[in-house]
Image (cartoon, helix red, strand yellow):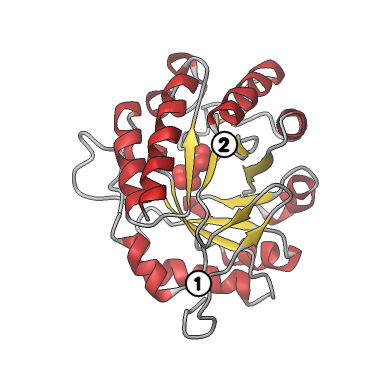
Amino acid sequence: SSRAFKPNDTIVKTPHNQIGGHNLTLMAGPCSVENEEMIHRVAAAVKAAGASVLRGGAFKPRTSPYDFQGLGVEGLTYLREAADENGLDVITEVMSVEEIDAVGQYTDIFQIGARNMQNYELLKAVGRTHQPVALKRGLSATIDELLNAAEYIASQGNFNIMLVERGIRSFDGTYTRNVLDVGAVPVLHQLTHFPVIIDPSHATGHADLVTPLAAAGVAAGAQGLLVEVHENPAQALSDAAQQLTPAQFAKLATRAQKIHELD
Ligand code: PEP
Ligand code: MN
């Protein structure tokens, strides 16, 4: 993982993107794929706003086992079709070693969720696929723990890794769900050659905080944003408070691009 080992930025190549280096890649879509129609409409909307990767959870790591757990493989088929129809790549979470083959048939990028950052068997297994992996920082993980987790993937010969800062737990969750560690972006650029992505949605938990923190992340040097977008956030089956409408995402995308161009 270290810059000393590989001085130049790693560029993670997907069918439609080159993630890392001087590029800014916008990844957007709902927290969960809820049905076929909604993912097609959101895909078209985020594409029009400048996104090039479609996100959407089909296997969901919900805090409560009684909450919506995702549509599983059915959701993956809708996600893939919606992405293909709009010329987008797919990113979606894989939660267990057993799911890797199924998820891998539909996705371009495996997302490893924050709760699984230190699931070493899962990390080694996605490492063996050699497919792109977006590794989310754990809820209370240090930067060194994040880099060691990336090392588990790289140790299997898979260097197609991007690191996702999605906010860490702190003492005050009153107004922000987590605390976005903006400083992690330049620190990670010093320590590692892997692309750094900001997820301002899970970092804040509130839709009105997402755009300011996305802007901060890009200003700090993030090479991508992972943003939750839903047609009707209030009705979302997961993470209702933090999802942006397509119109709000379009504004975020314009602002992020302008800030990125300043560099
Ligand atoms: C998600 O991306 O929907 C998600 C569950 O993220 P995290 O693992 O960062 O909580
Ligand atoms: Mn979510």
Residue position for label 2: 51
In the rendered image, residue 4, in percent from the top left (x then y), is placed at: 47, 85
Residue sitting at x 33%, y 51%: 219
In the rendered image, residue 202, in percent from the top left (x then y), is placed at: 40, 40
Above or below, 127 relative to 73:
below
Query: Quick one: SS at disc 2?
Result: loop
Front in this rendered view, residue 99 or 24: 24
**Quadrant assignment for the C terminus:** bottom left
Amino acid type indicated by mark 2: Ala
Q: Is residue 81 left or right of residue 8?
A: right
In the rendered image, residue 93, in percent from the top left (x then y), is placed at: 61, 45
Can the viewer see residue 239? no
Q: On the image, which quarter does residue 6 sit in?
A: bottom right
- Could you give the CA–CA distance between mark 2 and mark 1, rounded to whole angstroms? 23 Å
Checking the image for residue 206, the label placed there is none
Q: Is residue 153 left or right of residue 26?
A: right
Checking the image for residue 193, the label placed there is 1
Label 1 Cα neighbours within 10 Å, binned few <14 / some 14-19 / many ≥20: many
Front in this rendered view, residue 223 or 56: 223
Residue sitting at x 69%, y 75%: 157
Above or below, 16 relative to 29:
below
Label 2 Cα neighbours within 10 Å, binned few <14 / some 14-19 / many ≥20: many
Can the viewer see residue 127? yes
Query: Quick one: SS at disc 1?
Result: loop
What is the residue that sits farthest to the front in this orientation? 262
In the rendered image, residue 38, in percent from the top left (x then y), is placed at: 63, 18
Given contact means CB atoms under 8 Å apart, are the residues at marks 2 and 1 in contact?
no
Front in this rendered view, residue 3 or 96: 3
